[in-house]
Image (spheres, rainbow, N blue to C red):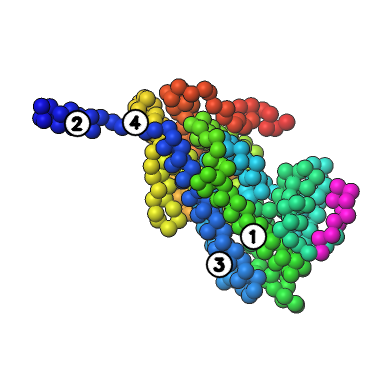
């Protein structure tokens, strides 16, 4: 009898263990908290670098601030897979990562930029140069540039989405300045003397520019503090999570947002302004880490900025238990996407800038981008098949005219 029981016990322990849905959701939330915590810590490092730049403007302190900004993008872009399925993230995200922006709202721009447009009366407002101005018929006292002025008054002023006054891209513009290279290689070239005092100041209003940069960076830190807290145990972001939440975020970022709005649209328009990180020429990295965020959400695994790996029960475990073939195909599609995004990233780091890839007639650049677009579209179809395999209702995936109705892009 002992032998029989031991054999039965061995047999039982050799059976595959199906992941528990609640464990998958708990791991999803724990990784979200870690990603936002990493985004916060790197934003705090950015704040320290910005403070050093303002205290002693030089090429060295400006470059250090730029390096800190680039580092801060790595964990943040991996959080974007939490958009679309989580209302608490979607209601907040526009404050920290909205793009594209009309940079003339914030600071001086080149004469070729133009002025106010029918779409945006404040496209060239230049808040840094104007301590008082009228906004939507209301007189605004901007003598003191504060986080509250940026978030409550300027951001999306007059309900125009391109009036981006806060977040990573406002800070990016203030560090790099406009990228005036068109389809040529090279990022923005703002001089460190734009933050100098006295006669050394270039661009005018250097103290106000420093105030704006400080306020925007402080606001980014406080916004990330808030979101990190929402994902803590018993935090509001953990309420109402479901498998549909995970799949909707994965599918919508893959398809409408990244493949469509951020990548194919730029190819269709051949517009170097259609870069997610257009001032810094960091778009290749933003695309790569967006894709990595989708993959690590499915696998339930994330490598933190300090090298620590968090892993646990995953959506992949659930799908594999229901239909191993669907899981195998989706994992292969995710890996293929990362291969294409990795090729694009390597090309950009090798000197073939994303701006150049977008130039009309540049077959090599178009192929690099469209190979990644097609891989993202293919993985979205596998995400939809995974939804079916789990017996869930169909998910609502964000679309894009560039993918769904290309003719509409030109109207």
Q: Residues within 10 Å of mark 4 (few under 14, many from 20)?
A: few
Out of 195 and 86, give the one closest to the viewer.
86
Counting the numbered discs, the total is 4
Residue 235 at what x, y percent from top left?
55, 45
Q: Nearer the viewer, mark 2 or mark 3?
A: 2
Of pointers 1 and 3, the one earlier in the residue sequence? 3
Q: Residues within 10 Å of mark 2 (few under 14, many from 20)?
A: few
Whole-angstrom CA distance, mark 1 to mark 4, is 44 Å
- Mark 3 lies on a secondary structure that is helix
Identity of the residue furthest to the bottom in this view: 199
Marking on residue 18? 4
- Mark 2 lies on a secondary structure that is helix
- Mark 4 lies on a secondary structure that is loop
Residue to which mark 3 is pinned: 64
The residue drawn where x is 64% and y is 45% is 92
Whole-angstrom CA distance, mark 3 to mark 4, is 48 Å
Q: Quadrant of residue 390?
A: top left
Residue 212 at what x, y percent from top left?
71, 62
Residue to which mark 2 is pinned: 9
Of pointers 2 and 1, the one earlier in the residue sequence? 2
Q: Is residue 132 magenta?
A: no
From the image, which quarter does the C terminus lie in?
top right
Q: Nearer the viewer, mark 4 or mark 2?
A: 2
Q: Nearer the viewer, mark 1 or mark 4?
A: 4
Q: Nearer the viewer, mark 1 or mark 3?
A: 1
The residue drawn where x is 81% and y is 50% is 122
Q: Residues within 10 Å of mark 1 (few under 14, many from 20)?
A: many
């Amino acid at each position: 009898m002992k032998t029989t029981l031991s054999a039965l016990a061995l047999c039982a322990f050799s059976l595959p263990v199906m992941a528990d849905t609640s464990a998958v959701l708990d791991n999803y939330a724990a990784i979200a908290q870690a990603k936002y915590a990493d985004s916060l810590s790197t934003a705090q490092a950015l704040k320290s670098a910005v403070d050093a730049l303002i205290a002693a403007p030089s090429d060295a302190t400006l470059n250090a601030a730029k390096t800190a900004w680039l580092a801060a993008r790595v964990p943040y872009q991996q959080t974007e897979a939490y958009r679309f399925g989580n209302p608490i993230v979607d209601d907040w995200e526009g404050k920290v990562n909205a793009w594209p922006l009309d940079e003339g709202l914030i600071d001086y721009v080149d004469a070729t930029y133009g002025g106010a447009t029918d779409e945006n009366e404040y496209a060239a407002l230049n808040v840094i140069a104007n301590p008082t101005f009228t906004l939507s018929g209301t007189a605004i006292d901007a003598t003191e540039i504060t986080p509250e002025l940026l978030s409550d008054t300027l951001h999306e002023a007059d309900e125009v989405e391109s009036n981006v006054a806060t977040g990573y891209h406002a800070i990016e513009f203030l560090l790099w300045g406009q990228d005036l290279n068109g389809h040529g290689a090279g990022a923005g070239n703002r001089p460190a003397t734009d933050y100098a005092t006295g006669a050394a100041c270039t661009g005018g209003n250097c103290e106000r520019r420093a105030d704006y940069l400080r306020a925007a960076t402080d606001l980014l830190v406080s916004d990330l503090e808030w979101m990190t807290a929402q994902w803590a145990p018993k935090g509001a972001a953990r309420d109402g999570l479901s498998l549909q939440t995970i799949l909707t975020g994965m599918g919508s970022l893959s398809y409408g947002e990244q493949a469509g709005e951020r990548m194919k649209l730029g190819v269709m328009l051949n517009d170097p302004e259609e870069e997610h990180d257009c001032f810094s020429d960091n778009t290749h990295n933003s695309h790569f880490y967006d894709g990595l965020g989708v993959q690590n959400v499915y696998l339930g695994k994330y490598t933190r900025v300090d090298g620590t790996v968090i892993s646990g029960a995953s959506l992949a475990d659930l799908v594999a238990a229901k239909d191993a073939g669907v899981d195998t195909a989706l994992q292969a599609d995710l890996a293929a996407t990362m291969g294409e995004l990795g090729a694009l990233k390597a090309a950009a780091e090798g000197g073939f800038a994303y701006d150049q890839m977008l130039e009309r007639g540049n077959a090599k650049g178009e192929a690099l981008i469209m190979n990644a677009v097609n891989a993202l579209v293919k993985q979205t179809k596998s995400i939809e098949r995974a939804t079916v395999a789990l017996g869930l209702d169909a998910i609502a995936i964000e679309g894009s005219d560039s993918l769904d109705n290309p003719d509409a892009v030109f109207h």
